[in-house]
Amino acid sequence: MEASFGPTFSAVAAGAKAEGSSSYKQHRRTPSSSSTLTYSPRDDDDGMEPQVFAEQPSVKLCCQLCCNVFKDPVITTCGHTFCRRCALTSDKCPVDAAKLTVVVNNIAVAEQIGELFIHCKYGSATVAGKPGAFEVDPLGCPFTIKLSTRQEHEASCDYRPVRCPNNPSCPPLLTMNLEAHLKECEHIKCPHSKYGCTFIGNQDTYETHLEVCKFEGLKEFLQQTDDRFHEMQLTLAQKDQDIAFLRSMLGKLSEKLDQLEKNLELKFDVLDENQSKLSEDLMEFRRDASMLNDELSHINARLNMGILGSYDPQQIFKCKGTFVGHQGPVWCLCVYSTGDLLFSGSSDKTIKVWDTCTTYKCQKTLEGHDGIVLALCIQGNRLYSGSADCTIIVWDIQTLQKVNTIRAHDNPVCTLVSSHNMLFSGSLKAIKVWDIVGTELKLKKELTGLNHWVRALVASQNHLYSGSYQTIKIWDIRSLECVHVLQTSGGSVYSIAVTNHHIVCGTYENLIHVWDIESKEQVRTLTGHVGTVYALAVISTPDQTKVFSASYDRSLRVWSMDNMICTQTLLRHQGSVTALAVSRGRLFSGAVDSTVKVPDHLCFFFCVCGYF
């Protein structure tokens, strides 16, 4: 370990870089480029340096909550960008009143702000009569620098105030004047002052003093003593840390031992309870098996007699197996019933093709998107997929090959539906209508007047139903005009289903609303889920209609539309259930646990035999 024994009057590092230097991306201010633009720090910006911009920043780089240039910009759940502190301290988005929750840093905006030119803080002065406001100081630093390189420049700025290292009582200095001051300073101390030398003088007397200083001949011994003392201090500090750590571990071990003793007692109690419950469950299982055998005997008897009646399937919605293969959450499902194929789209940016009739295996993985696959739709022999990369890809189902890619929206494609040889795609505040011409999509019209993300689209007969924030709009597919608006509650509409008699929607706030399809009057609100209702599906027969709902709470619920009650709750998945698809009476479900659940063959049997 070395120490300097010389006084502080050596040459000071060079000041600001020469004009045009690329090191700081700085420019020398001229009268024509001078600016009086001011920035007043916000009250909640603790320790924030004043910023005086060389040019007026774009409005797009200003937060809509605090009206200042973004500081630490983040994207929130509503899709807008705000300062992180503004987003954390504000309840609602000023644009659409949505609840603000930080999702991710907006790196692109942060980089743009970092490229803005500002005046060095040592070239700025407080505006007279306006505390907290700043303007350009013509006598200060003449450079403008990029905001991202500010600290690097200001650390070596010639105009940075410094104190004399020899005596704090010397008047304040600028960095550029420090070297000259040190040559004339009358307060230079002997480097051995900490050992008792009382010399104070200027540079000339300092050199003379060193020749006669009694401590100069002992400096090596003194230095070695300091080094040894410092090592002992470090060793002592390390030992203190070790002792504190051992005490902490001892306390934790003691707590863990107490907890283990308590857990052991609890486990003996739970073991006794489980043994009793297991006996009860076994008896209940035997009763259920007996009931199921009686049910099957009854159905066989009705089949042999040629009587085809209706049958309530609430006891037979069971899971046969699981499709496993995706490396991320499954967000959408689509069935090609002609070939018994199931398509699933995932966060892993792929679409998997599953055989649902014979092998029950993945036939192929379709790759082509650069973002999450959010929507799937089939028209004829074509599969259409929408993604967070803002594109729609057209796939040939016969060859399972990509045949076209369309840049569809400026934002993620959330949902797709086809009808009347047209494809409808939903995104942020817009629905685009595309004419299907072979493998091409020709933009026909854009439907506007929507207040938020369009996450749900359903086409039924001659109408298109779209869901956004607390609104369902009904469009005439032939004229592409809005013919009715349904107002709802519970936040954004995430799912829509249409039956012969009802319009059903699932919302962000766990509710399912039901309207009469003819009168457009709301007839019921179905409750039971404790999470967002992501998907709805319908299975209808001449005798009855069942609606299935999938939720963030990991459950599927079966609703009888005759009496508007939940007849069964299914727990198939280990994560939120995000997608449903129906094929020949079979219900497929996809979830955040990256799996797709396949229905039991028994359920399929009842469907094809007319009991569903």
Image: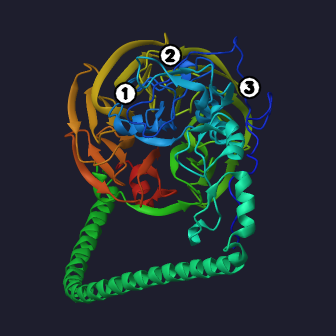
Question: Which of labels 3 and 1 is toward the front?
Answer: 3
| Percent position of residue 302, x then y | 30, 57
| Percent position of residue 111, x then y | 64, 35
Nearest the viewer among 280 and 188 is 188
Q: Which mark is residue 469?
A: 1
Residue identifier under label 3: 27
Total numbered badges shown on the rendered structure: 3
- Residue visible at 43% across and 81% down in the picture: 245
| Percent position of residue 145, x then y | 68, 30
Q: Secondary structure at mark 1?
A: strand
Please state which amino acid type lies under the numbered disc 2.
Leu
Q: How is the image coloured?
A: rainbow
- Residue visible at 57% across and 25% down in the picture: 124
Q: Earlier in the sequence, mark 3 or mark 1?
A: 3
What distance separates the C-alpha of mark 3 from that of mark 1?
A: 49 Å
Q: Earlier in the sequence, mark 3 or mark 2?
A: 3
Nearest the viewer among 612 and 2 is 2
Question: Which of labels 3 and 2 is toward the front?
Answer: 3
Asked if residue 53 is positioned above or below residue 506 in the image, the reply reads above
Residue identifier under label 2: 447
Please state which amino acid type lies under the numbered disc 3.
His
